[in-house]
Image (cartoon, rainbow, N blue to C red):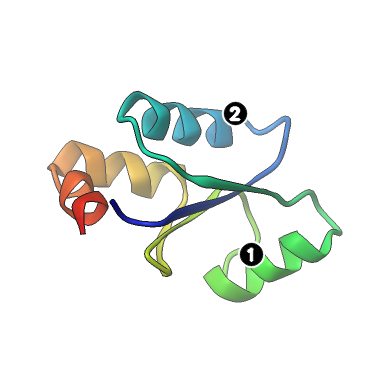
Amino acid sequence: MAKVEIYTQDWCGFCARAKGLLSRKGVDFTEIDAPNGSAEREESNRRSGRSTVPQIFIDGAHIGGCDDLMALEGSGKLDTLLAA
């Protein structure tokens, strides 16, 4: 199974949606709490080039945020990435 990392923030509905999809699929993931102004958020911004959460990485590759994750699921490509 692939290594999945997700930068999140507590109140974020998109974060909850992305984590929910991963959980329903039985994917183990590392959640990194990254509120605004934190070192973790700066790391997320640096790694992803984006300033919003969630930011999701599969095996170190940035796949984007919640909408990107949902698009991968809808196209059937997410399972392939997760199986790597």
The three-letter amino acid code for the residue at tag 1 is Ser
Q: Is residue 46 left or right of residue 82?
A: right
Q: Secondary structure at mark 1?
A: helix
Cα gap from disc 2 to disc 1, whole angstroms: 18 Å
Quadrant of residue 67 within the rendered picture = top left
> Residue 11 at x, y = what percent?
72, 30
Quadrant of residue 12 within the rendered picture = top right
The three-letter amino acid code for the residue at tag 2 is Gly
30 is higher (above) or lower (below) than 11: below
Q: Is residue 54 left or right of residue 27?
A: right
Front residue of this view, candidates 47 and 80: 80
Viewer-side label of 2, 1: 1
Within 10 Å of the Cα at label 1, are there few (<14), some (14-19), or many (20+) other Cα atoms? many
Within 10 Å of the Cα at label 2, are there few (<14), some (14-19), or many (20+) other Cα atoms? some
The disc placed on residue 13 is: 2
> Residue 8 at x, y = what percent?
64, 44
Q: Earlier in the sequence, mark 2 or mark 1?
A: 2
Q: Quickly name the residue at label 1.
A: 44
